Amino acid sequence: MGFVNEVVSDEDIARYNLPFKPGDGRYWTRDRELDCYLWGGIIENFSREYIPEGRFWLFMRDTMLDISLNVEIVSIGSQVNAPKIVWKEVSHIQPSDLGGLDMHEVLSVLRSALAVFGLDGEETRPPHESVAMIQF
């Protein structure tokens, strides 16, 4: 099936001990078959000339990874054009030993999840209409 953007169920909030309130309607990008999920988003602060970054939590193989990414928002989109985002590079992963996971596998799963996550993790588009470009 692969990754999809969906609203987190109350059952999954409890099962994974997520920091969401039941019924909040929070989104995540999830692959049920792999029992893997990604949640987070882009952090920006224009008042301090802060360079945007992606801040995510990736759960795979019973390991939670804290990941930061350098990002470039190419466009926020319009009625005519889809938004575009470039995930440039991974700038931080914790734990540094990846909890025993293989780096190549982690990056492969992360790429797949980000391609579906797109700009905000809430839109659903067919895979051929991805708004994400991944450069790592």
Image (spheres, helix red, strand yellow):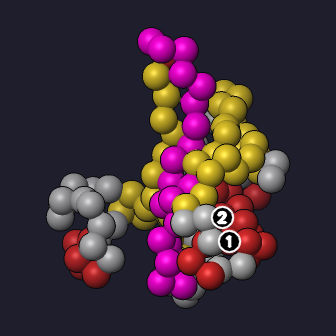
Q: Is residue 75 above or below residue 55?
A: above
Q: Residue at x 46, y 22 (%)?
A: 45
Residue at mark 1 to residue at mark 2: CA–CA distance:
6 Å
The quadrant where residue 71 appears? top right
Crowdedness near tag 1: few (<14), some (14–19) or many (≥20) residues, C-alpha within 10 Å:
some
Q: Residue at x 47, y 71 (%)?
A: 64
Q: Is residue 104 above or below residue 21?
A: below
Q: Residue at x 47, y 84 (%)?
A: 62
In the picture, measured across the screen, residue 133 lies left or right of residue 12, that is: right
In the picture, measured across the screen, residue 116 lies left or right of residue 39, that is: right
Q: Which residue is mark 1?
A: 106
Crowdedness near tag 2: few (<14), some (14–19) or many (≥20) residues, C-alpha within 10 Å:
many
Farthest right residue in view: 135
- Give the residues in magenta: 47-67
Does the magenta run of residues contain 51?
Answer: yes
Amino acid under disc 2? Leu
Residue 73, how many percent across, how many down? Answer: 65, 31
Residue 106, how many percent across, how many down? Answer: 68, 71
What kind of element bears circle 1?
helix
Q: Residue at x 72, y 79 (%)?
A: 102
Q: Which residue is mark 2?
A: 110
User: Which dot, 1 or 2, sits closer to the camera?
Assistant: 1
Does the magenta run of residues contain 56?
Answer: yes
